[in-house]
Amino acid sequence: MDADEVDRSLTRSAAAPVVAVVRRVGTSVDAVRWAAGYADSLGAPLVVCRSGAVTDAAADVDARVRDALASYRIAVTTIDCGDTCDFGSLVPDAAMVVVDGDDLDGDVVHRIVDVVAAASAWRVVCPITVVRGLPAADELPLAGAVLVGVDSCVRTEPAIAHAFEEASRRGVELIATHSWVDTEPDPLVGGTTECCGTPMGESITLAQGMAGWQELYPDVPVYRHCAHTDPVDAIITGSERGQLIVVGAPSAEAVGTDMSVIYGLVDRARRPVTIVPGPR
């Protein structure tokens, strides 16, 4: 991706709304809080999508949403999604969709699959952020680096571009993490396949993935971390000194792609995780 492509992408995102999904039967408005801060930093409007049926608890949720937005001077639109969230139709030009990872239905796998599959099922091509572990409103906000996972098996250019932009806008460092294990799942045939990674070879893979980006963002200090360990463990360990995790998701047309890393991060990370759809 060259500089012109990055500039065009950011120009499109700057005027696009940020979408926060809040469940009427939920207990948390962290997605709204995070999305409001993100929209405020972009100078973008916020769209609050209220999902689920109207219940007696809905008024309480609406009140907490209003409280969460009280300190922000941003344009806010509220829409009702009912039981189905087809954001591709409701907000086709969204810059970001934000959901609350602590407030989604279903078991862990179904919850995460629903979030990750949103890029195709909801026909949204923007990043999706799953918010977990957000400090309370009266506590200090998350601080530190932006961490991006660089995977040799998934085209991560869009995720790297997003991570650099976030680090630059927030004025923080970027930690690029790549890891490998001796075996990895083979979703096409089942079972596992042997990996032949070496520290030098995997360091080269990381360097190749990051090539050119430092020149586009000279204001962002970059730290590269390459580890012979489980990718989820590596990213979560690195995120302990950070405020945001960015990972790439495969394109909607990809078949049999192993999603275990994204599953693990959304389930275990105590930092917001932004999933950036791959090339379509």
Image: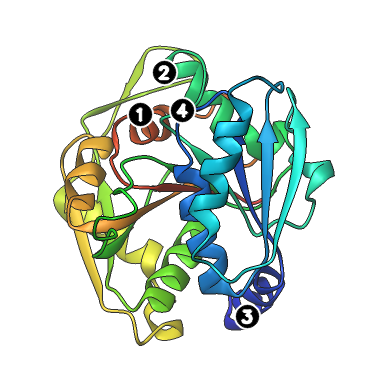
Q: Residues within 10 Å of mark 2 (few under 14, many from 20)?
A: some
Is residue 263 visible in the rendered image? The answer is yes
Could you tell me how far apart the alpha carbons at marks 2 and 3 are, in whole angstroms?
37 Å
Q: Earlier in the sequence, mark 4 or mark 3?
A: 3
Of all residues, the one furthest to the right in this rendering is: 89
Vertical order, 222 against 105 (above or below): below
Nearest to viewer (mark 4 / mark 1)? 1
Labels 1 & 3 near each other (Cβ < 8 A): no
In the rendered structure, find residue 258 and report the number of the disc placed on it: 4
> Which residue type does callout 1 highlight?
Asp
In the rendered structure, find residue 267 and report the number of the disc placed on it: 1
Q: Earlier in the sequence, mark 2 or mark 3?
A: 3
Q: Which residue bears the numbered disc 2? A: 108
The percent position of residue 194, horizontal first and vertical second, equals 28, 26
Q: Which residue bears the numbered disc 3? A: 7
- Say whether residue 81 is left or right of residue 114: right
Helix, strand or loop at label 2? It is helix
Could you tell me how far apart the alpha carbons at marks 2 and 1 are, in whole angstroms?
7 Å
Residue drawn at 41 percent across, 85 percent down: 215
